[in-house]
Amino acid sequence: MVFSLPFGSAADLRSAYEAVDWSATSLGTPDDWPRTLRRALELALETRFPVLIVWGPDLTMLYNQAYADSIGRKHPALGRPVHEVFAETWAELEPLFARAMTGDAVWFTDMPVMMDRSGFLEETFFTFSYSPVRDDRGDIAGVVDIAAETTRQVQDHRRLELLSRLGDLATELQPPLELAKRALDVLTTLPADLRAVDLQLPGHESTLPPPPSVLSPRQVLVQDEPGAPRLAWVRIPAALGGESAGVLAAVLSDHIALDATYRDFLRLVAATVGDALSAAASYEAERRRADLQQWQARRLAGLVAVAQAMPDAQDEHDVLQVLGRGAVGLLEADGIVLGVLQDRNLQVLGDVDDPAAAALAGALGGAPVVRDDGPGTSVAWPLRLTDRVVGALGLSWRRDRVLTAEDDDLLNALAASTAQALDRVRALRSERKAAAAVRSLAETLQRSLLTSAPLPQHLEIAVRYLPAAEHAQVGGDWHDAFLTASGTTCLVIGDVTGHDQDAAAAMGQVRNLLRGIGYSLEVSPAAALAALDRAMRDLGVGALATGVLATIEPLDGSQDWRLRWSNAGHPPPLVVSPDGSSQLLRTRPDLLLGLEAEFVRADHVHGLPPGATVLLYTDGLVERRGASLDDGLQWLADTAAGFADRSPAEICDAVLEHVAGHAEDDVAVLAVRVRPEPLDEVVIPS
């Protein structure tokens, strides 16, 4: 079975599955896995979202490529009990799995998890849901974990909050050393990133060692020796408003990778502290501090606004519009362009004659490009994801512009946000395209299983099918109308439980069996449904279904007709009279089809005058979230009564129009009317 799983391009994951001796695990060989487990695993492998499935008493692990990427060097962990793989954090995870195994779904947002996935115990955060999974007998046998790592978002949020609080210090007119103490108070509130921190300034007592060598501007010097705290030093630019610089010293977390983001954060902390100290040096510096604070606040707010607006972008042009509203003002630029790599070709969005457009290609190598050899200045900043460059952001100024370190940091932040937005836009486009294709295929398959209605002389019949608004799946709803060998009109509406390929296949079997029984046996609806029950049992059709089978026949010596029907757990037929009144033919429904082969079913009879319309439908037409079934049935009776003067086809279309776009289930509808005047001949669709 493993060899046939939908690994797609994840060849390494396929190899990892094949390398496991499954017979030595509690799951046994893949051929013996329960069908529900195989189906859950197939769905997991076909999604790009990280998914973990644990199964059996020891919670054996199965997962997809996205999950393998999220656990780092713990992969491969296939076939191993989850408590062995996550031993370092099992004390926190075990109660959550235990809850899920009792049937209680578990949901956490931004839950901290200390995980050894990169050679050290790493601080990570996840938003995830643990949901129970049942086996083929209906017992809970495992848990599915759908997770999204939010480590970067949580860390960025708390760091941004710290930087904002540090920036607020610039509004306080205090002596520099007093301000340094206030800054230390703020910095010590973030022990997750700064275990200990010191501002090494002239006249200020230091608590951490000085840097072992002279620091250059923007340098982050790190001393990482085994068995000793990891120390870092960053120069505080013009710490006292003069030429001499102070130093930000910090004991860094052992649980966070010392990557570019961590280093940029230290630079931003040092820069923000330096700004506050410089602003406090003198009254003139205080005036500059006020201007600087306003400038920083505007930049920070603008950067946050850009970051908040990016998730709403639907395409690359929307991304450029967000940048045009925010980035141009933040950097006081005169022009902005966006270069996007499409199939290795650079597509320029915006004014192609902007000076920055010519610099975009140079930034695709991964380094920023600055051009100041002509009138004005233009820059191009690479848009980098983890493993590749996806484009470049270009800005231009008509005047000469020298970029500051803060400008660089802002451009780095804007570029990172833009790269993520472009990646999200492309993923969204791919998902929409795939969903549309699957939905189209599902609807085509569903409709191919349904047939057109015949046109008897005395009856007018219309059928309709509407797929659910939020499902791109085939389902089990069906309608049918046919003439028996003796010319009797048979009408069928039914719903096989489920919304997948199995339900559609079972629907096709049940429909064809019932059509054959109705055509050949020439028995009452109740007898036909009873014969269907026995055929489903004897032929091994393992499905449950609701349904109504009805016949319409003329009454001897009268213009009226007789509706005879049998109901197997289905919503009742609705009769709309020519005068606009309506009646739900409520009876005590019999058992669902497929439950008990020897169940004795009942027939029911109702008279139909010429012009009367009978409406058969599936439950998706009358079920509403937050409303009872009786409310839905009454709504249908009132709505259909208003269309009494319309044809059966128009009635079907009118009631479906009320639910189109928000139906939570598939809907099948069949309407039949007794013609006041018969047709000249019977028409039977091929």
Image: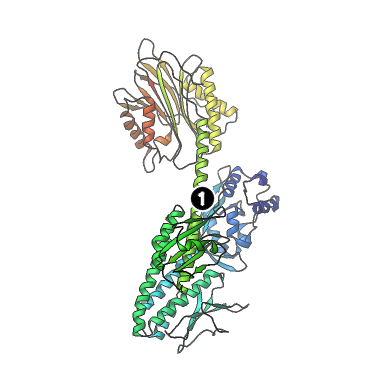
Q: Using the rendered view, name the quadrant where residue 650 is placed.
A: top left
Q: Amino acid at mark 1?
A: Gly
Query: Is residue 143 placed above or below 216 in the rendered structure?
Result: above
Query: Is residue 666 placed above or below 608 in the rendered structure?
Result: below
Please name the colour scheme applied to the rendered image: rainbow
Which residue has dot 1 on it?
103
**Residue at the location (56% across, 65% down)?**
366
| Residue 11 visible within the image | yes
> Would residue 574 be found to the left or right of residue 526 on screen?
left
Percent of width and height locating residue 82: 61, 57
> Would residue 26 be found to the left or right of residue 577 on screen?
right
Percent of width and height locating residue 102: 52, 52
Percent of width and height locating residue 381: 50, 65
Under circle 1, the secondary element is loop
Quadrant (top left, top right, bottom left, bottom right) of the N terminus: top right
Considering depth in this image, is 3 or 10 the residue closer to the camera?
A: 10
Percent of width and height locating residue 469: 44, 41
Q: Using the rendered view, name the quadrant where residue 172 is placed.
A: bottom left
Furthest residue toward front:
374
Considering depth in this image, is 598 or 185 the residue closer to the camera?
A: 185
> Would residue 577 be found to the left or right of residue 553 on screen?
left
Q: Residues within 10 Å of mark 1 (few under 14, many from 20)?
A: some
Query: Is residue 306 placed above or below 30 in the rendered structure?
Result: below
| Residue 128 visible within the image | no
Q: How many marks?
A: 1
Furthest residue toward top:
557
Furthest residue toward bottom:
203
